[in-house]
Image (cartoon, grey):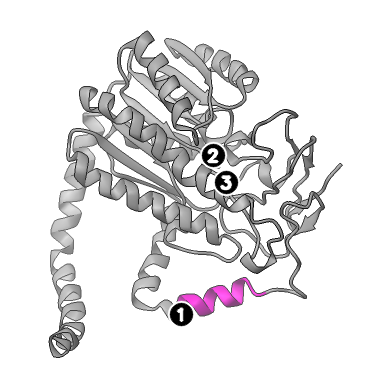
């Protein structure tokens, strides 16, 4: 068996490359035909029901406005009900037929069942489920002083997407609906200081890729991945509200604006309505995938040069409530995060370098 594997290691890769090169023109033609078909057969969202989790700001907020322009009925879900009220009014003015706001925590299955049941009781159906919750970090693993943040990172980035999908799936089967998930390029392009984030996103992608086969064509799945996108994360001021059950700032709760975020939201909604399986923004990140498969050492050397530390390595202050300075550039929109045990904190990131301070 070892001899067979050795032979296949030499034969399969070059043979596959030759076959791909020969089939490339036909694949491009098929892709072009699919693009033309989806362009002229885009799903009409008029009076359709769309649930958006993590809708209190950021990408989730912009996605809500995009669906509103298409005349959909929106169900906006997040922990901050006060923030959702303002977004719901904006969505109505933008064109949404009806907007429901539901305060819920998506890492709790009971909360997910509650907002699903409220949606079904009022509308009787669900057509699109959009999961946008995400929580990033920028620490080296050995620097962490408070490991209690670990399960929260994985809960938000993984279970915060799985639970809403699990409870909504029976109703999505009934409507031949679609699940849209907001992921990140880190799921296959790991970067320093994002180990847990990258691991959670990789698990999330594998979950939805498997679900795609299980659901076949009865429920569509659109996976949106993004690299770095501009936002107020790099130049704004964000505050944790008192009394919040989870005392850290989540990406889903950071107000973001500007062309890149709005453009990404438009791409997601447009791609979902066209039935596209993948949305990528920007698409040039794909070149790194080629290097990772065929020349991983070159990719590793490149990142070491680009992300080499300038000076001594800092100690992570995650969980201590003290400020820290991030010395390395971020290539993706996941912002620095801090876990606090209580009291309002103000995050004041400055770029470059990114800095968080307590006031």
Residue corresponding to mark 3:
152
Q: Mark 2: which secondary structure?
A: helix
Residue name at image x 73 percent, y 55 percent: 354
Residue 71 makes an appearance in the image: no
- Closer to us: 291 or 251: 251
- Dot 1 or dot 3, earlier in sequence: 3
Q: CA distance from mark 1 to mark 2?
A: 31 Å
Write the start and end of the magenta stretch as one range: 299-308
Q: Determine if the magenta segment contains residue 43.
A: no
**Residue 12, quarter of the rendered image:** bottom left
Can you tell which of label 1 and label 3 is closer to the viewer? 3
Check the image and report above or below for 267 versus 149. Answer: above
Q: Residues within 10 Å of mark 2 (few under 14, many from 20)?
A: many
Residue name at image x 44 percent, y 59 percent: 285
Farthest residue, direction right: 359
Left or right: 208 in relation to 214: right
Residue 352, image x, y percentages: 73, 57
Q: Mark 1: which secondary structure?
A: helix
Check the image and report above or below for 112 versus 285. Answer: above
- Closer to us: 234 or 56: 56
Farthest residue, direction bottom: 3
- Dot 2 or dot 3, earlier in sequence: 3
Residue corresponding to mark 2:
261
- Closer to us: 120 or 356: 120
- Dot 1 or dot 2, earlier in sequence: 2
Q: CA distance from mark 2 to mark 3?
A: 25 Å
Location of the N terminus (image quadrant): bottom left
Question: Looking at the rendered structure, which numbered label has been put on residue 107?
Answer: none
Residue corresponding to mark 1:
298
């Amino acid at each position: 068996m070892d001899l067979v594997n050795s032979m296949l290691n030499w034969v399969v890769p070059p043979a596959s490359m030759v076959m791909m090169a020969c089939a490339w023109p036909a694949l491009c033609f098929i892709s072009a035909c699919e693009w033309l078909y989806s362009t002229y057969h885009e799903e009409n969202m008029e009076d359709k029901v769309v649930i958006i989790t993590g809708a209190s700001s950021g990408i989730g907020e912009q996605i809500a406005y995009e669906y509103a322009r298409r005349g959909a009925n929106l169900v906006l879900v997040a922990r901050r009900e006060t923030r959702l009220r303002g977004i719901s009014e904006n969505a109505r003015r933008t064109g949404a037929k009806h907007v429901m706001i539901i305060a819920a925590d998506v890492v709790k299955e009971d909360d997910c069942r509650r907002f699903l049941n409220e949606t079904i009781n009022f509308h009787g159906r669900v057509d699109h489920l959009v999961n946008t919750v995400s929580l990033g970090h920028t620490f080296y693993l050995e620097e962490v002083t408070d490991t209690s943040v670990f399960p929260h990172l994985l809960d938000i980035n993984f279970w915060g997407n799985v639970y809403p999908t699990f409870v909504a799936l029976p109703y999505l089967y009934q409507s031949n609906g679609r699940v849209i998930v907001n992921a990140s390029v880190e799921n296959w392009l790991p970067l320093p200081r994002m180990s847990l984030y990258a691991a959670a996103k990789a698990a999330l992608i594998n979950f939805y890729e498997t679900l795609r086969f299980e659901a076949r064509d009865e429920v569509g799945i659109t996976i949106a991945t993004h690299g770095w996108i501009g936002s107020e994360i790099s130049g704004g001021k964000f505050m944790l509200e008192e009394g919040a059950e989870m005392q850290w700032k989540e990406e889903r709760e950071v107000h973001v604006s500007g062309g890149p975020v709005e453009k990404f939201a438009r791409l997601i909604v447009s791609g979902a309505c066209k039935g596209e399986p993948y949305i990528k923004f920007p698409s040039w990140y794909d070149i790194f995938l080629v290097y990772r498969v065929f020349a991983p050492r070159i990719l590793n050397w490149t990142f070491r040069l680009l992300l080499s530390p300038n000076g001594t390595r800092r100690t992570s202050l995650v969980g201590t409530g003290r400020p820290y300075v991030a010395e390395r550039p971020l290539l993706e929109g996941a912002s620095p995060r801090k876990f606090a045990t209580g009291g309002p904190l103000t995050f004041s990131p400055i770029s470059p370098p990114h800095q968080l301070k307590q006031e």
